């Protein structure tokens, strides 16, 4: 049960890995929006080339991409079949009893599967090549202007970093508590809904108590080291915007323009 | 004031991490469509709300879903499910603890959460009809009619989006709220001595 890997980050030294997280976040965000502009073969081909180029440059082994795709492959197939069967446009290709396949339906099914695939590969690529901490730092700076309207962006990023740091620790603690309760005869993995619900309570209570204790210690340790919020804070990891980041932005903007011009 | 604030911030962060872990181990419910998964990940958010107020609860819900999206990923590549979970959880928490915060007793917590469940069920059914289903349909590219047709094969009383919601989404949210209430009460009773110590200034 605990052999799941939390997080998908694959460390590396490729061009994509070394891009600034801010640039990557902006590019992926824009890309996911503009992919909805694509509506013919040329525009879809452009989007696919853009994604494949990213995958190629990242040098991430394809099996990691595949692993990211695995949970949704069924959804894609399901969507594909639904689109083929229920879109009644264009020429009738196959007809057998109640079973009809139209040309329009087939094309639409291909397009929509492509769109899903491209969106998922692009977002997976972001999390594969950027560590969660980098994403948090990038988000904090990108959302920085929101501080002007009194949104606690810094506190949010701090909480995110702390949560990321303590997920493995808490997972370990959960495992410990589960073992301790199993030794006392508790069963978490089988049984009816009611018995599972019952088993979860003695698991959660020690987890909460431990978290409160840890929070108190951590807050004290942070204050002892002079943490006093956002103002005047210096960073261990500095984000540096380089030429390649500007290049990525330009390419993404160019792609946006191309999709606008070439869409049917 | 400053010390309690930092302690709150850190506690909220750790509660979000617990919520995220619970969310990862969520399991789909029998008899319901797969995208409706039952998890107890709202429990840490409710505990956070009891301790630090509704804003803390909403922050926990938000962080939990953001972590889930970053670390696990979303089925559609776009966090529609995460957004739905965030809205549902926040609604349940804010309305649920609103009654509790007036009279801090176990009874008012039960009443409040059941009231919150009803509110959440109503609002989520409306949101599903107008926002969530249409956006799933947009990102997955099939029309709502097609989704309904697929659901019709499984359950013959479902013949349009409204009946899909009445027969799948509505009972799911009701059941989820009730199970959450059932879980939170014993946890609340056991944690109560500590909750008081954290929120109230030490008088004695």
Image (spheres, grey):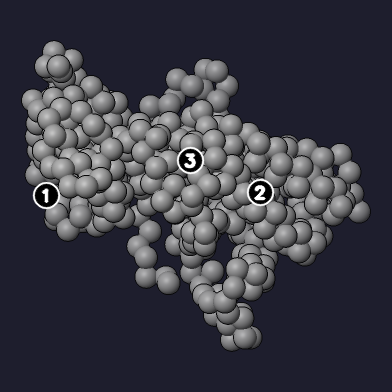
At 50% from the left and 44% from the top, the residue drawn is: B158
Where is residue A140 drawn, in percent x and y? 42, 32
**Secondary structure found at label 1:** loop
Where is residue A176 drawn, in percent x and y? 54, 75
Distance from disc 1 to disc 3, alpha carbons, whole Å, reads: 48 Å
**Front residue of A219 and A196:** A196
- Dot 2 corresponds to which residue? B174
Where is residue A172 drawn, in percent x and y? 48, 69
Please report, as a chain letter, where disc 1 is located. A
First-in-chain label (3 vs 2): 3
At label 2, counting other C-alpha atoms closer than 10 Å, the crowd grade (few under 14, some 14-19, many 20 or more) is some
In the image, is B100 to the left or to the right of A112?
right
Q: How many marks?
A: 3
- Whether labels 1 and 2 belong to a single chain: the reply is no
At 35% from the left and 33% from the top, the residue drawn is: B143
Distance from disc 1 to disc 2, alpha carbons, whole Å, reads: 47 Å
- Dot 1 corresponds to which residue? A59
In the image, farthest residue toward the front:
A97
- Dot 3 corresponds to which residue? B159
At 29% from the left and 48% from the top, the residue drawn is: A78
């Amino acid at each position: 049960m605990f052999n799941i890997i939390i997080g998908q980050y694959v460390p590396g030294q490729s061009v994509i890995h070394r891009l600034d997280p801010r640039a990557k976040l902006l590019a992926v965000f824009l890309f996911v929006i503009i992919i909805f502009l694509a509506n013919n073969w040329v525009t879809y081909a452009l989007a696919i080339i853009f994604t494949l180029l990213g995958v190629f440059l990242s040098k991430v082994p394809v099996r990691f991409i595949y692993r990211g795709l695995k949970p949704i492959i069924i959804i894609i197939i399901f969507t594909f079949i639904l689109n083929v069967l229920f879109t009644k446009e264009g020429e009738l290709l196959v007809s057998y009893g109640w079973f009809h396949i139209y040309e329009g339906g087939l094309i639409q099914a291909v397009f929509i599967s492509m769109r899903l695939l491209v969106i998922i590969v692009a977002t997976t690529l972001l999390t594969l090549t950027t560590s969660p901490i980098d994403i948090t730092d990038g988000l904090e700076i990108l959302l920085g202007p929101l501080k002007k309207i009194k949104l606690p962006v810094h506190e949010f990023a701090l909480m995110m970093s702390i949560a990321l740091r303590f997920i493995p620790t808490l997972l370990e603690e959960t495992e410990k508590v589960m073992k301790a309760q199993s030794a006392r005869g508790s069963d978490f993995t089988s049984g009816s809904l009611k018995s599972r619900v019952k088993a979860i309570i003695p698991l959660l209570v020690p987890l909460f108590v431990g978290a409160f204790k840890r929070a108190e210690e951590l807050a004290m340790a942070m204050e002892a080291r002079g943490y006093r919020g956002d103002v005047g804070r210096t960073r261990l990891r500095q984000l540096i915007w380089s030429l390649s980041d500007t290049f990525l932005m330009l390419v993404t903007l160019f792609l946006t323009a191309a999709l606008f011009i070439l869409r049917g | 004031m400053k010390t309690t604030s930092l302690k709150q911030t850190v506690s909220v962060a750790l509660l979000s991490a617990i919520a995220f872990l619970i969310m990862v181990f969520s399991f789909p419910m029998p008899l319901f469509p797969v995208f409706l998964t039952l998890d107890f990940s709202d429990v840490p958010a409710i505990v956070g709300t009891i301790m630090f107020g509704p804003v803390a609860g909403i922050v926990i819900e938000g962080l939990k879903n953001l972590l889930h999206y970053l670390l696990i990923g979303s089925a559609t590549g776009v966090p529609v499910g995460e957004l739905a979970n965030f809205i549902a959880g926040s609604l349940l928490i804010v309305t649920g603890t609103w009654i509790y915060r007036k009279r801090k007793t176990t009874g008012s917590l039960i009443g409040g959460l059941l009231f919150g469940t009803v509110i959440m069920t109503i609002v989520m059914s409306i949101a599903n009809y107008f926002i969530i289903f249409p956006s799933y349909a947009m990102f997955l590219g099939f029309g709502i009619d097609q989704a309904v047709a697929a659901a019709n094969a499984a359950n013959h009383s479902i013949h349009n989006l409204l009946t899909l919601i009445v027969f799948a989404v509505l009972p799911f949210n009701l059941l989820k709220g009730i199970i959450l209430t059932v879980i939170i009460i014993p946890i609340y009773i056991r944690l109560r001595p500590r909750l008081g110590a954290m929120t109230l200034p030490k008088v004695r």
